[in-house]
Amino acid sequence: MKFTEEHEWLRPEDDEENVVTVGITDHAAEQLGDLVFVELPAEGRTVVKEDEVVVIESVKAASEILAPIDGEIVEVNSALEDNPGLVNEDPLGAGWFFKLRVEDMSALDEFMDEVAYKKFI
Amino acid sequence: MDRGGARTWHEAWLNGGAMTDLMTTPLTPLHEELGARMTEFAGYRMPVQYPMGVMREHVACRTGAGLFDVSHMGQVTIAHPDGPDAAARALEALVPQNVAGLKAGRQRYALLTTESGGILDDLMVARRDGDLFVVVNAANAQADIAHLRAGLPGCEVARVDRALVALQGPRAEAVLEAIAPGAAEMSFMDVRALPSDHGELWVSRSGYTGEDGFEISVAREHADGLARAMLDAEGVEPVGLGARDSLRLEAGLCLHGQDIDAGTSPVEANLVWSIQKIRRSDGDRAGGFPGAGRILREIADGPARLRVGLLPQGRAPMRAGVELFAGSRAVGRITSGGFGPSIERPLAMGYVDIDQADVGTTLEGDLRGRRLPVRVVALPFRAPTYRR
């Protein structure tokens, strides 16, 4: 698993080549507080790094999740539409946002591993 | 693209770097001990939320009691050599409220108006035995005091250096009665000086949540002890600025600088209820306050736009800055919005053209480039539980 400075995690899927699952870290979820709304992107959308792809809202504030790398959205976690609190309950698991098909998996190399991320926060 | 006031969360929460040179309150160490996340607000270092989180703090206030540090607000006394009646009459030159008719031991909501009929600030005015005691918004305190001094030449206007806390919710009465006997006998908008182990408390039965509760002015050196005594009581939780905002929004209460300001009149702001008949046209003390011409004309003829309650019909919150449309016509803008933990849905307030202000009107809010339905509703979103 890799981590970005924007507090997102990226996990390459074992059973699907070139597919990466993206979510936010437990640190990020805790900082955000209770989420009340998640707006997910359309499946099939092609995104470029730093595109706004997800809108998340806590009681107090709206925030955007940016695409960490270029790719195509192949699946979104539609369970979040009914239960945005999943992000707070299980940010690294059931609270994932979307799966991205990427052309070049080496794009992940620039991100931090868990040890480096722990040091970063 | 209009993001509807959105900021990325790392901007909002993690760039707390500029937290130096901020003023503190006597309760700042307690907030930090309780694990609060602190933010800058009106020049003060204040708690946004405690480990419990905004949602649960909000609910705790509605089901038990919430303790708020509001020491950043401006506490001001207005005295006159001829006594409090003279001070009250003088203050009527600056506000459209009936201050002279306020009985000793009573408080009322008031507005400092501008010459053009806008709202310089909203405030609470208490008539005490010897003077008036006024609480103004933190961000406006210095300007308000200068305005009061300039407008009340015969009066002594002094800032009071005490801490201020609010205890709000259904448990508030029992908790405060145990600390300051006499609190339970007070009615909504009563003010009393009550003795306690924490010195004399200046108590008013009022607040900013829509709940029954109290606002309590306490000597700075006793603030920590008083706050701990309240937090030790069953059902009392500390509440930060995050839930303070969602609570006041559900109660339909305005935030100055956001829902009301120098560009909004009291009539547009739907605050005509706060202007007593005696100060309106044909009243015994009609007019005589800044902006009276426009304000009295708008009471008679109606305003061009009105502050209304708004319920987004979907799940997406609509926040300050979201533009409102009736068909292709822009008809208004949201001034406060978010999520109401007690009503369990998004809610907002804002200004709309008067012909779109009827309860039940459906408009569209422009949310990130999409038009989503939003309905005009009556305020408040949740009936208050004041002890009248």
Image: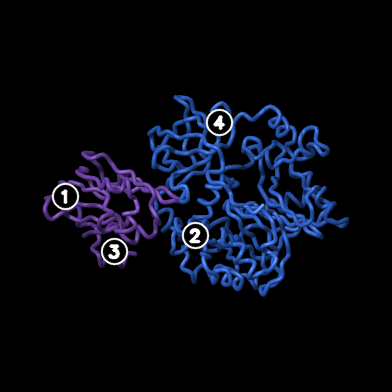
Q: Amino acid at mark 1?
A: Val
The chain assigned the colour blue in the figure is B
Query: CA separation, marks 3 and 1?
Result: 22 Å
Q: In the rendered image, which residue does mark 4 sit on?
A: B357
SS class of the residue under badge 3? helix
Q: Nearer the viewer, residue B48 or B107?
A: B107
Q: In the rendered image, which residue does mark 1 sit on?
A: A19
**Residue occupying the point 85% across, 56% down:** B83
Q: Position of residue A119 (x, y in %)?
A: 31, 67
Q: In the rendered image, which residue does mark 3 sit on?
A: A117
Q: Is residue B367 left or right of residue B355?
A: left
State which chain disc 1 sits on: A
Residue B104: quadrant of the picture: bottom right
Disc with the residue nearer the chain's start (3 vs 1)? 1
The chain assigned the colour purple in the figure is A
Q: Is residue B231 left or right of residue A65?
A: right
